[in-house]
Amino acid sequence: MATLDHYLLLSAVLFTIGTAGVFLRRNLITILLAIEIMLNAVNLTFIAYGRFLGAVDGQIIVFFVMTVAAAEAAVGLAIVIAMFRHRGSLNPEAFRTLKG
Amino acid sequence: MSGELALFYLFGGAAVVASLLVIGQRNPIYSVLLLIASFGALAGLYVLLDAPFMAVTQIIVYAGAIMVLFLFVVMLLNVPAEAPIDHVELHEPQGARWLGGVLAVALLVELGWALWRVVGVDDGRPVADAGQLASVLEIGRVLFQEYAFAFEVTSILIIVAMVGAVLLTRRDSGAGS
Amino acid sequence: MTGDSSMLLWIPLLPFLGFLVNAALGRRLSRGASGGVACTAILASFAVSATVSWPFLFGAPAGAVDQRLYTWIQVGDFVATFALRVDALTALMILIVTGIGSLIHIYSTAYMHEERESEYARYFSYLNLFAAFMLLLVLGANFLMMFVGWEGVGLCSYLLIGFWYTKPAASNAGKKAFIVNRIGDVGFILGVLLAFRHFGTIDFQEIAAALGPVAPDSQFGVVSLIALLLFVGATGKSAQIPLYVWLPDAMEGPTPVSALIHAATMVTAGVYLIGRNAVLFSHAPDVLVIVALVGTATALMAGTIGLVQHDIKRVLAYSTVSQLGYMFLAMGVGAFGAGIFHLYTHAFFKALLFLGSGAVIHALGGEQDMRRMGGLKHALPVTYWTFLVGALAIAGVPLLSGFFSKDEILFRAFQSGHTWLWTVGVLTSLLTATYMFRVVFLTFHGTSRAGTPAAPDVLVADGAHGPSHAGAGHAHLHDAPPAMALALLVLAVGSVAAGYVGVPHALGGDNRIEAYLAPAFGAGSSEADGVEAGTPETPGEAADEHGATLELGLMGVSVLAALGGIGLAAFFFLTRREAAARAAARFAGLHRILLNKYYVDELYDTAVVTPLVAVSRHALWRGVDAGFIDGSVNGVGTIVRQGAAALRQVQTGSVRAYAAGLLLGAVMILGYYLWR
């Protein structure tokens, strides 16, 4: 029987993978993908908790998370496209004009 | 080992491997496709957790819409494969990258530790009457009664995102940026 | 008579209103209007003063009339009321200030007629303001009120001395007067504070009452210290040693100012201070000795300096210092009435002498050097005769006012047992007659020396006839115009007649002024026995046949001194002018010392002024202000700037770095909570 702890640990692992991806990749789109991984890990946590606490709210929250993730992906990709047009590169290090 | 546990390991493992590959390998098209696989595994996990509606929604929205969007963008921008790590361009500072990586591991350790310490919510036995839980009727009822406001706000959010996306990618037609 | 009156406030208020009018509207008023406003204000004040003083002069001189206006300060135990009080002494003082003040205002309307209208109005506004403050000084019922007036007259003195402020000598003289006065004021303030601490009050009557039953200090105690500190203030205001140095320089101001402020009124404030606190000073015999010594020494020193000065106004200035010394001598031997009597007669003849010299200067188009005067006796008859009357009065020739007052002082000095003081006093009397008649002979007699080429140490001409009349070339050699002549004549009459209120018993008079002033100097509780220890003496009872003979004898000596002085002056400056030049050459060293005023100014400059300026410039300005204060303020800015520059490094522009920061924070916070 898979306990709650199993699911939570799995979620933690996925979250960490996503975090590492944000820092280690040099491609803006891949970074966005890593962010999606993180969001999914969180979704898993919510549904697991919802299941083991006997409430349906967990699924509701995931519902909203997905919606927001969709919006965020859309806008994020739009920004990436605009920035690509500006700089011709997808390397996040190419956008350092806000350096103090 | 019970079937459920086996399935858990199966789907869980698939998700982890796919995610690792997403961030591990360099071709962005492969990354997107691998992520779709990861989502599929997660959908399976949702089903194991008696949330079939969410599983289906995950496939439809995430794998079907968002990832397709990513794919479109990747193809639009003709994103090349990422250069290997030893070809460092633009004299970028490497510190942030490696610090981030280390910190991610640290985060994992902490989360594990947190799990170790936490007293179990219950002994892990699933709650009876799971069918009630999973019903779409139930989801719909809660969604449109208790979370009605959030629902409406989310719709506004989607409109904003749509307008924003259109505006951001509009090409200058010579009338100022 | 004792009681309350609501009229007292008008006495200082009327000139103050005159000041306001001239200050606010002066630019738009014609000369006649400005002068008219000012003269009306002071004359009205004189009228009120006369009304208030009448009961004291012709009724009973005892008691006092109060006017309490409001409680000004109330902090803990300290209560200071805005209160005015008139008693016999104050009544006399307000009459002097407003009476002679009015004459000088009228004189000024003619003397200053060449000024621009705005300057004319400014002059009269200052003159009115001065009168207001001086009246406040003498009317004050407590130390704080007096101090307001004290400081106010100091301010007006500065404003009026430096009236022609575009002339550096004038503005410097104004500053010098103000600063030297300030030094004296430190003593005054300390004395007042100590008095409050000791008596719990600063009201004059209350202090006198508190001291009534107390015996005088047998050694130098708190009361003596208070008296000494107040005397320091008096030396500043009344130009005694060591703070007299401002008065000769003050001659840079217009001559009527010199007459009013530096002869008749402001400089007498110190003498008035001691008179007002007669009971206090009587309880401090050690301090009285100091007062007498300082007064006598100053009188002698100033007399010697005045003997050789070439500027007519300088001679008169030193003469004032010298006569003030006499007044302090009188106060010092306990003859408070005699000191005030001399103050009163001196006001007349000194003002007369100054105004007369002003007429001469005016006629000669700004010339002040006596070596270029002469032969004016027939050209300026009114001026000459009135000036002569003044000179006779100050010399102490019998039948004129100066004789009675000066003689009273010398007699009391002898009586006090300090024969040395009397000797020096007589010697100074001789000097006074000599230097005064030197002025008379050099200025009015002989042949005119106008147009003589200027000697190397010539003084700059009086600024009233500044740029428009260049030096001695332009002279409207006419006698004083009516406004000026009126003042001269009235003062001349006063110089003769004023003394008759104090004819001593030895000559058959009844010394009315002494009796009149006596209640003002006594404590309220000791009216019954006037010769109790600690009360100022009333000499009336002390005169018996022995006393009369002695007094007549002493009188004879001083008359001889006066006539002798006149004779000396006549010899050296009327008949044998060459003898003067030969004597000057023979005693060249002494002559130079006297001419340079014993080098006191130079001494002060080296000992006090230069070190202070050096400390101010290098330590205080460069070190503290520019270095420390500016440095701290700028330092704060520098620190902020450098701190910001350091902190700015965090903004690398790389979003990933920011994200790493976020993650670091999250990890740490999580770790912290896990740790607990």
Image: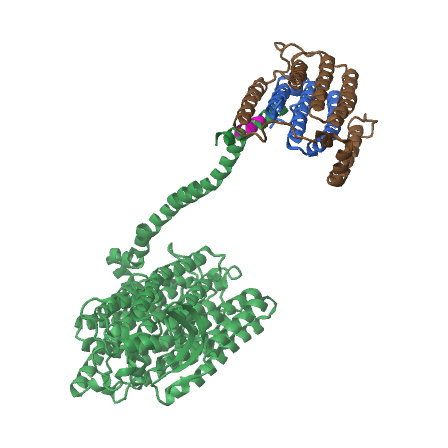
Chain colours: A blue, B brown, C green
* Residue C327 shown left or right of residue C548 in the figure: right
Residue drawn at x 35%, y 80% as measured from the top left: C89
> Closer to the camera, B162 or C253?
B162
* Residue C315 shown left or right of residue C555 in the figure: right
* Residue C32 shown left or right of residue C151 in the figure: right
Q: Quadrant of the N terminus of chain C?
A: bottom left
> Closer to the camera, B137 or B83?
B137
Task: Note whether C579 is above or below C12 in the view shown.
Answer: above
Provide residue C307's location: percent of width, then percent of height: 30, 65
* Residue A18 shown left or right of residue C305 in the figure: right
Provide residue C372's location: percent of width, then percent of height: 40, 63
Q: Quadrant of residue B152?
A: top right
The magenta span reads C663-668
Residue drawn at x 38%, y 65% as measured from the top left: C312
Provide residue B69's location: percent of width, then percent of height: 78, 21
Q: Furthest residue to the right?
A: B173
| C564 is within the stretch colored magenta | no
